[in-house]
Amino acid sequence: MEKIGSKIIEFFASNDLIKNEDKEIYKYAFNIILSSLIHIATVMILGLCFNLLIESLTFYCAYIVIRKFAGGYHAKRQQDVILFLL
């Protein structure tokens, strides 16, 4: 996922859409957005597969609210989350 983000940001920088000194900020933001979209898509696809789309939407909305106010595990890298869950 980071490789995809890096390539897209490099494309933006080479076309002067973003400044070279801001590339790291854009890479981080793009990775966060991409990760969030993958999570949302996964929940929606599973909801459709099990014919529980409304329940999936309800779960995800509640999860977003809880996540804003609750603490939790803070990984240094995205791969650490997978290792934590295993």
Image (spheres, rainbow, N blue to C red):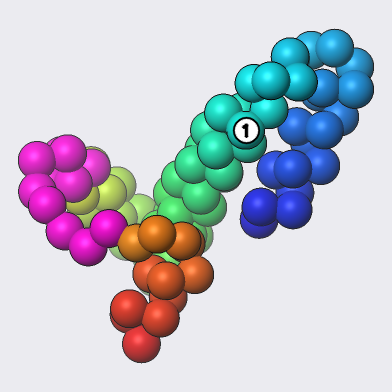
Q: Nearer the viewer, residue 20 or 60?
A: 20
Residue at x 46%, y 61% (from the top left corner): 77
Question: Residue lying furthest front in this view?
Answer: 21
Question: Residue lying furthest right in this view?
Answer: 15
Question: Helix or strand or loop: what does disc 1 sit on?
Answer: helix
Could you say where residue 13 lies in the image, as x and y percent from the top left? 82, 22
Could you say where residue 30 lies in the image, as x and y percent from the top left? 59, 36
Q: Is residue 72 left or right of residue 8?
A: left
Could you say where residue 46 lies in the image, as x and y percent from the top left? 43, 66
Q: Is residue 38 left or right of residue 26?
A: left
Q: In this figure, which residue is indicated by the disc labeled 1?
A: 24
The stretch in magenta equals 64-74
Q: Is residue 26 above or below residue 42?
A: above
Q: Nearer the viewer, residue 50 or 70?
A: 70
Type of the residue with mark 1:
Glu
Residue 49 is inside the magenta segment: no
Residue at x 32%, y 80% (from the top left corner): 85
Q: Is residue 85 above or below residue 17?
A: below
Residue 37 visible in the snapshot: no
Residue 21 visible in the snapshot: yes
Image quarter for residue 86? bottom left
Q: Is residue 37 above or below residue 18?
A: below
Q: Nearer the viewer, residue 76 or 43?
A: 76
Image quarter for residue 64? top left
Residue 66 is inside the magenta segment: yes
Q: Nearer the viewer, residue 46 or 7?
A: 7
Which quadrant holds the N terminus? Answer: bottom right
Residue at x 40%, y 59% (from the top left corner): 76
Residue at x 47%, y 62% (from the top left corner): 78
